Amino acid sequence: MIYWEKAKILLSRILTNTKCHINKDTLAKVAEWSRNISWRSPKTAGITFLALVVFLGGIFYFSTTTSAVAIFVNGNNTGYAASMTEAKEIVEEVLSKQGEVAGTIARTTDSIEYNKVRIKKKVYATNTISSEVLLKSIKPYIDGYGLQIENKVAIVLANEQELDAVLTKYKDYFTKPSEKNVVNSAEFLENISKVAIKVDPSEIMNVDQAFDLLIKGDVAESNYVVEPNDSLWLIARKNNMLTDEVIAGNPGFTEDTIIQPGQEIKIVKVQPFLTVLSKGTKVVNEVIPFDVVTKIDSKLGYGKSVVQQAGKDGEKIVTYNYVEKNGSVIEKQVVKEDILTQPEKQVIAKGPNRATVYVGTSRGSGSVSGLIWPLSGRINSYYGYRWGSLHTGIDIDGVTGQPYVAAASGKVVSAGWNGGYGYAILIDHGNGVATRYAHSSKLQVSAGQSVNKGQTIGLVGSTGRSSGSHLHFEILINGSSVNPLNYL
């Protein structure tokens, strides 16, 4: 009876602890079974007691635990999946998603192992594996194709075909092939090669992304030691840059910053990853600017002028062979010119009194040769009567801060503010020939100074009466303006 009493007490405790884990039918069967057993024999009672402990303990264990598969990455447990199939599917899902960028399945060199385990349900619930958790533990890679430029991989794409597409698109961007532009050859000046490499999926670019990166170029930084008589604009000139670009590379600098010999400043330049050297033949339509003829008419009042015949630009088709570097012409040879329409001269009648407009310039025959362009750029406005008034020079397109040079050697007559011309320079070249440079943002010479042909004398701007950054350039013969295109 002592065993029976102890068994009932222990059984009651076990049933109390496990009643939430087993159903009512099971409890009823256990109770009925216990009533039908003879408990008179101590041996029977002891065996029954142990059997009940094992049985009910097993029920408790299996009701509070679950089977799972532990995923180990490089020996570290990353979490659990419900089954072996689910565990492998999660790994495959992660690798497949990472490979989507290249249309393939990513791989990994990490060691991945699967172990079947039985753990508490609470542990499983808080450590269930997910794609995000697994991705933090492994390093996927895919096989890509990189463009190596001078021993440095600049871009990586999914395959060789996409890499070829980027290079073709880059060449076409600068060469612009068309019916009127036959590109005979286009090659890269840099040493390039295509290399197969294993990379993180995040490093793979598509064609447009890779193209944009190549076009933007690479930032190169170097140090420059200031020399005696250096200035920011001269340093920019030496490095083929604009003054604003030099200033931008040195935080705290302004146009008025004073630099000293021996001082070290930074030169920050954006350089293209690739340089395309192309050769071909272009056919372009060009304007033939009309000439202006001035006649003295004594019937007109002093300082008066009348357009007797309106001028009209002509047009011609020019065929030329070229050599270009990233779209900029470095060699040009005209093959033929076909004139479509001849220009018509503009005839202007002026009164007899031509006041001296420019003071201090020489007088002479006006013979001039060897003048060079002060600035390289397209012509925005030609010489002649436009919109009811005489445009006394040509407007050459430029960027504010871009340096321009003297068209010939001479002496600076004036350099400073000049009304509608803004900041302007007048240079006397002798023999009655003078040149004017207007709308400058900054002047680099002063009155009375001698200058050489090709010497930088100012920076392009939009001062005075100007609608945008450009250089207004005039040629004057004995004080009267002439068409610069007839002398350049």
Image: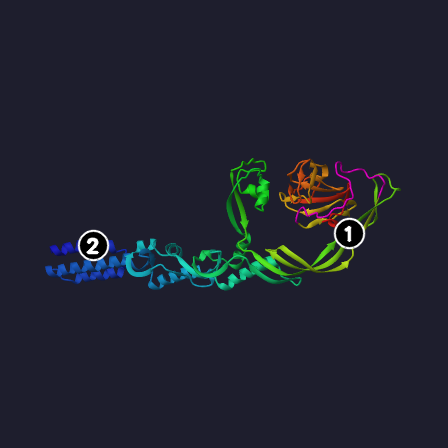
Give the number of the mark in front: 2 or 1.
1
Q: In which quarter of the image is residue 29?
A: bottom left
Does 352 lie within the magenta span? yes
- What main secondary structure does the magenta stretch of the protein show? loop
On residue 441, the disc is none
43 horizontally vs 56: left or right: left
Q: In this view, does 397 lie to the left or right of 121?
A: right
Q: Position of residue 203 (x, y in %)?
A: 46, 56
**Residue 106 found in image quarter:** bottom left
Q: What residue type is labelled 1?
A: Phe
Q: Does the magenta stretch include residue 338?
A: no
Name the kind of residue labelled 2 in the image. Answer: Ser
Asked whether, in this view, residue 283 is left or right of residue 118, the answer is: right
**Viewer-proximal residue among 346 and 229:** 229
Residue 448 at what x, y percent from top left? Answer: 69, 35
Q: Which image quadrant is residue 130 in?
A: bottom left
Q: Can residue 52 be seen in this view?
A: yes
The residue closer to the viewer here, 98 or 44, is 98
Q: Where does label 2 land, which residue?
A: 12
Q: Residues within 10 Å of mark 1 (few under 14, many from 20)?
A: many
**Protein image colouring:** rainbow
Pointer 2 with pointer 1, Cβ within 8 A: no
Residue range of the region highlighted in magenta in the rendering:
350-376
To which residue does mark 1 refer?
290
In the image, 50 versus 456, the foreground residue is 456
Q: In this view, does 46 lie above or below 460?
A: below
Q: What element carries label 1?
A: loop
Real-space Cα distance between discs 2 and 1? 118 Å
